[in-house]
């Protein structure tokens, strides 16, 4: 998932749709994010490339909306409802996820296992 | 107390009589005159074998075969009657002979030359001042105030020059070097030329024409003394100051046991560097103990003794004799490599055993000495009146407690092969010294547990006050990067290599004190 500066980022992504849960006065999604362009990328335990300043999922509360939607810990969030998440500050990312007017967030996430799955499936078909 | 003599100091000295010109590595060119063209020779080998065998030699040559225990179990013949000489006495006599013969000639010659030059230099200004008064006193103008002031200046400058020359040049000589000291010779020549040219000028322009201007003559004399002071300044810079700044790092290794030290020297000629190194050697290097080398020699002998080469083809092969020897040695090397050698095993176990033995003996020794020291104590003032009969001075006290520790100490010295470095007498002296100065048993033992620098032992163990400098470059050349020379004495040689301290290019970087700013490393986690 490393990127080359100046070139478009290519990744295999999974679409995950999470319905927000009303918890008192707040709408919660049930996960925690870390990362951002204003944060220190070296401390990110989930990234392969330690200069990656993207937004990562650091924790998922059990049984929460994110867990049920299939979000996994360590996923990198590429888009939220069409908004780019690869070059945003931590606070901007939080804001995009917690808009009060939206009930549903559609995320594009990527993880390493996705790429490998694609590679496997590519190689399965026997050559004629 | 054991009666066997431990001063077998001659044992190892004779053991090296295998080399035929061992006694002879003395530099004979001490008698060489100080000719300037000796400096043009490029290669120096100073060794010359002796012409006549000395007194001690014939008694020594008989003992060619040395086995390892010889030093430990033999006893030197001590004087049983007034007319017998022990071997140590013979050694001492021959060494005294060597020391006193001939080497003073060159020193006295140098000294007399220096004194003559000095007298010439000092009397010249006085002569310049006095001669006009003697030769043409009636024509001479009288000396005014300024002129008499100059007299005082001449007097004091001469006094300062006298003191300075005495301080710089008339110090006891530290050593006799093989070649002439280049800078001193140059300075002497310079001073001589200078004084001669002044005399020439004086003779021609003043004596011949009988100049009446006495003030001018006095000023001439003053200028001479000033110039002499400046030459003395030059002498200080050349002889003393120039070599203070370290320029070279020399590595000195002893050839027999590999003991290595590193020193920093300035810009010196090879012979002066050698002198500095030898002085450091006496102070820093642990004393040379040949008994410790016998083990590796016996191992080496065993390696060679195991193989013998037979010539199967018969003796008729004279044409290829050289090639034959070459192939013989090659065959031996190959066979030795293939042979399954277990000598490393023996070495390992032997060393472990020796270590254990040394430690056990050391433990016994420490206990014995501590116990011995408890038998005496310093007498207090008030006890002095009580029993004057039992009072002992340090020597007697040492003799009283020595027997209880003598055996343990001797055994320890035998195990560490140091027994020839310490005689009974020296041990007792050291004990008396320690008792006098209130030293603890541990302090007393320290000089026997670790080998000290050569200078601390008795004069017999310095052995080599005559050193030979072996060098490919001329010894009056200055040290350069990569100079290698050898300092050889009777038992071993010191291999000296020099490396130049590199030129350091330093640049500066300015840091504004206000530029030290820090930020926190952010790593926040937000739950959404």
Image: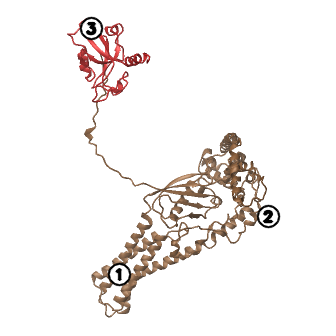
Chain colours: A red, B brown
Q: Nearer the viewer, mark 3 or mark 2?
A: 3
Q: Quadrant of the N terminus of chain A?
A: top left
Residue that appears at 47% across and 58% down: B481
Return the x and y of residue B335 as percentages of the image width and height. 71, 46
Q: Are marks 2 and 1 in contact (CB under 8 Å)?
A: no
| Label 3, label 2: how far apart the Cα atoms are | 120 Å
Question: Disc 2 is attached to a residue of which chain?
Answer: B
State the residue in front, B306 or B165.
B306
* Residue B109 image label: none
- In the picture of the structure, the residue carrying the numbered disc 1 is B221
State the residue in front, B287 or A121.
A121
- In the picture of the structure, the residue carrying the numbered disc 3 is A20
Q: Earlier in the sequence, mark 2 or mark 1?
A: 2
Return the x and y of residue B188 as percentages of the image width and height. 45, 75
Instruction: Evaluate whether residue B407 shows in this view.
Output: yes
Q: Is residue B173 left or right of residue B428?
A: left
Q: Quadrant of the C terminus of chain A?
A: top left
Quarter where residue B348 is shown: top right
Q: Nearer the viewer, mark 2 or mark 1?
A: 1
Question: Disc 1 is attached to a residue of which chain?
Answer: B
- In the picture of the structure, the residue carrying the numbered disc 2 is B81
């Amino acid at each position: 998932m490393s990127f080359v500066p100046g070139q478009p980022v290519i990744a295999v992504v999974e679409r995950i749709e999470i319905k927000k849960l009303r918890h008192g006065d707040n709408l919660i999604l049930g996960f925690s994010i870390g990362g951002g362009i204003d944060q220190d990328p070296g401390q990110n335990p989930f990234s392969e490339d330690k200069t990656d300043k993207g937004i990562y999922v650091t924790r998922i509360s059990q049984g929460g909306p994110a867990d049920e939607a299939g979000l996994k810990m360590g996923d990198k969030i590429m888009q939220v409802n069409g908004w780019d998440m690869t070059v945003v500050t931590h606070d901007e990312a939080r804001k995009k996820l917690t808009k009060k007017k939206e009930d549903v967030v559609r995320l594009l996430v990527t993880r390493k296992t996705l790429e490998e799955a694609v590679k496997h499936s590519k190689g399965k078909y026997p050559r004629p | 107390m054991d009666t066997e003599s431990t001063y077998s100091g001659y044992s190892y000295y004779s053991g090296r009589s295998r080399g035929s010109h061992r006694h002879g590595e003395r530099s004979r060119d001490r008698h060489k005159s100080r000719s300037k063209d000796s400096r043009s020779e490029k290669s120096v080998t100073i060794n010359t074998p002796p012409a006549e065998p000395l007194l001690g030699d014939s008694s020594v040559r008989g003992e060619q075969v040395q086995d390892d225990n010889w030093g430990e179990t033999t006893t030197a013949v001590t004087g049983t009657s007034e007319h017998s000489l022990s071997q140590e006495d013979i050694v001492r006599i021959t060494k005294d002979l060597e020391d006193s013969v001939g080497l003073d000639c060159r020193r006295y010659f140098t000294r007399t030359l220096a004194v003559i030059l000095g007298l010439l230099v000092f009397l010249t200004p006085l002569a310049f001042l006095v001669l006009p008064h003697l030769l043409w006193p009636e024509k001479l103008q009288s000396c005014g105030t300024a002129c008499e002031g100059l007299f005082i200046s001449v007097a004091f400058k001469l006094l300062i020059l006298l003191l300075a020359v005495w301080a710089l040049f008339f110090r006891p000589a530290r050593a006799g070097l093989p070649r002439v000291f280049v800078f001193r010779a140059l300075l002497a020549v310079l001073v001589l030329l200078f004084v001669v040219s002044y005399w020439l000028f004086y003779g021609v322009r003043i004596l011949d024409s009988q100049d009446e201007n006495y003030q001018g003559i006095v000023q001439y004399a003053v200028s001479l003394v000033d110039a002499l002071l400046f030459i003395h300044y030059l002498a200080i810079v050349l002889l003393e100051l120039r070599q203070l700044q370290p320029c070279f790092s020399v590595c000195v290794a002893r050839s027999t046991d590999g003991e290595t030290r590193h020193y920093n020297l300035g810009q010196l000629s090879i012979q002066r560097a050698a002198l500095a190194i030898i002085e450091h050697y006496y102070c820093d290097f642990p004393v040379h103990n040949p008994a410790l080398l016998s083990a590796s020699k016996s191992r080496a002998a065993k390696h060679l003794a195991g193989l013998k080469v037979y010539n199967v083809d018969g003796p008729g092969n004279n044409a290829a004799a050289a090639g034959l020897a070459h192939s013989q040695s090659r065959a031996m090397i190959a066979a030795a490599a293939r042979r399954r050698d277990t000598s490393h095993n023996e070495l390992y176990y032997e060393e472990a055993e020796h270590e254990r033995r040394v430690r056990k003996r050391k433990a016994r020794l420490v206990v014995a000495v501590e116990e011995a020291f408890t038998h005496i104590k310093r007498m207090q003032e008030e006890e002095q009146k009580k029993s004057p009969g039992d009072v002992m001075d340090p020597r007697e006290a040492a003799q009283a407690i020595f027997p209880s520790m003598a055996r343990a100490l001797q055994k320890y010295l035998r195990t560490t092969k140091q027994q020839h470095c310490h005689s009974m007498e020296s041990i007792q002296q050291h004990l008396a010294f320690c008792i006098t100065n209130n030293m603890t048993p541990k302090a007393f033992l320290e000089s026997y547990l670790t080998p000290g620098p050569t200078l601390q032992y008795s004069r017999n163990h310095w052995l080599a006050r005559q050193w030979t400098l072996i060098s490919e470059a001329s010894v009056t050349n200055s040290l350069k990067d990569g100079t290698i020379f050898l300092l050889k004495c009777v038992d071993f040689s010191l291999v000296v290599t020099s490396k130049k301290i590199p030129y350091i290019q330093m640049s500066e970087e300015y840091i504004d004190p206000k530029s030290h700013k820090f930020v926190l490393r952010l790593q926040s986690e937000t739950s959404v």
